[in-house]
Image: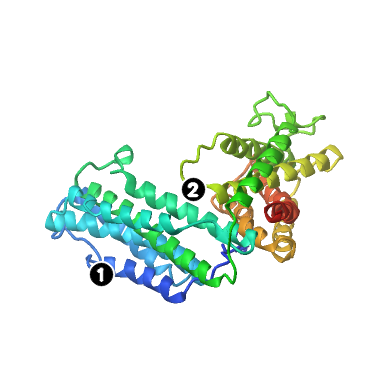
Amino acid sequence: MASKPAPSVSETLPVTVEPSFAAAQAEAARQLLDDVPRTFDSDLVPNGAIRKRLNYLNDSAREQVREIEDAPTTLERLWQASRARPDAREVRATWRAIDSDLTRKEVREETPEIRATTEEFASRWSYIGDDPVRALRVHAEIESDLVGARNWAASDGRDHRQFGDGPFGVGEAASRLERARVDNDVMNHMFDRFQHSLETTSDLKPRLETARRTLYGRVQRRIESLPDVDADLHESPSALLDRNVGDTAGVWALARLYQESERNALVLRNADDPEPALARRILEATAVLVTVRAFDRLRSRIENGDEMSVESAEAVVALRENALEAIEAARTNELASGLVRELLPQFARYVRWTDEEFANQSGAISVRSVERDVADYIVAAETCRVLPAVASDTAKVVREP
């Protein structure tokens, strides 16, 4: 079963990425590796430990570059190239530190120019748009890139340094700055393409701020309606129910939805946003409302007798098929389809995670272990079933004048 194809739910954005832009990002990664030997032998790197790690980084970066062409869409090729570029820069900088004495200080001299590029973009960007839902999705991506560009270039990464000022420390610093460059490139392209696609524009920031407050209020009320549980749900998930049905797959799924809801709601309550996060917080609040509604739906089913226990291999297959059907139903639902496409990948990936968990197991597996692992198929099914309705509610809130 685990070897069967998992659903591939591609990430999307309501902005058309120029194929030439994605290709340029891929070419930038390739050019970085063109300056690096395809493999490092003892003549190039006498130290065996350094040689082993450098070959590992080199192989990994080249694999990242090879995978760019395998991505099925232009957007996904862009995302893959965005991951490949920093890895390629790390390899080249590490090799130059060994071969030509490049220093961490020299790498960091590039920082002021990168920061200037970031702030130049920030000065011209605003929450403009015509359709608030479309704008919400685009600006959420831009927010992430802007915060990323600032953070990657903000420091020397001393809190995360493992390799000091040696060759791998140089590579680490170069990789951080390349991430900032990538974020700068992507957010500029996205915003320009978005601007050019608009027939009319308006400032949507006040509307988005009102929507965030409304959704935060809903999240708070829904979280307060969840059961008050003192038990350790990792040991006693049935504490979430008014009757003891045992630790079935359904009960484990219920516990995961409960913990996910509370954890993400806590993140929203404690969010301190000196950096742009307005659109992202709206999407995060929507995701919490999805998990809470899925929790309520699943709890009602179990309380009414559908214990969702795993008593056969066929039952596991059936739960997986149910998850696949729920994902497909959400994908083809016309209700708030833009927001559904935005959030669906994060819930659909529960199936892939569970497939990988089963694929990595061998020999005799306890029933209790299977009950726990298969719970994520149920989580995927329940969240994807309620996603269109919750997304529709958020779309209405965002579009309210």
On the rendered image, what quadrant is the N terminus found in? bottom right
Secondary structure of residue under mark 2: loop
Give the image location of residue 286, x and y in percent: 66, 48
Label 2 crowd (10 A; few <14 / some 14-19 / many >=20): some
The span from disc 2 to disc 1 (Cα, nearest Å) is 37 Å
Q: Amino acid at mark 1?
A: Asp
Rendered location of residue 155, percent (x, y): 31, 43
Give the quadrant of residue 54: bottom left
Q: Is residue 396 left or right of residue 355?
A: right
Mark closest to the chain's N terminus, 2 or 1: 1
Q: How many marks?
A: 2
Q: Examine the image and state in which quarter residue 293 appears.
A: top right
Marks 2/1 in contact by CB < 8 Å: the verdict is no
**Where in the figure is residue 360, as x and y percent of width and height?**
54, 51
The residue that disc 1 covers is 34
Identify which residue, 316 or 343, lies in the foreground.
343
Image quadrant in which you'd find residue 66: bottom left
| Residue 334 position in % (x across, y down) | 74, 65
Q: Residue at x 84, y 37 (%)?
A: 303
The single residue placed furthest to the bottom in the displayed view is 20
Residue 329 seen in render: yes
261 in relation to 242, above or below: below
Along the horizontal axis of the image, is 88 left or right of 386?
left
**Is 95 on the left-hand or right-hand side of 148?**
left
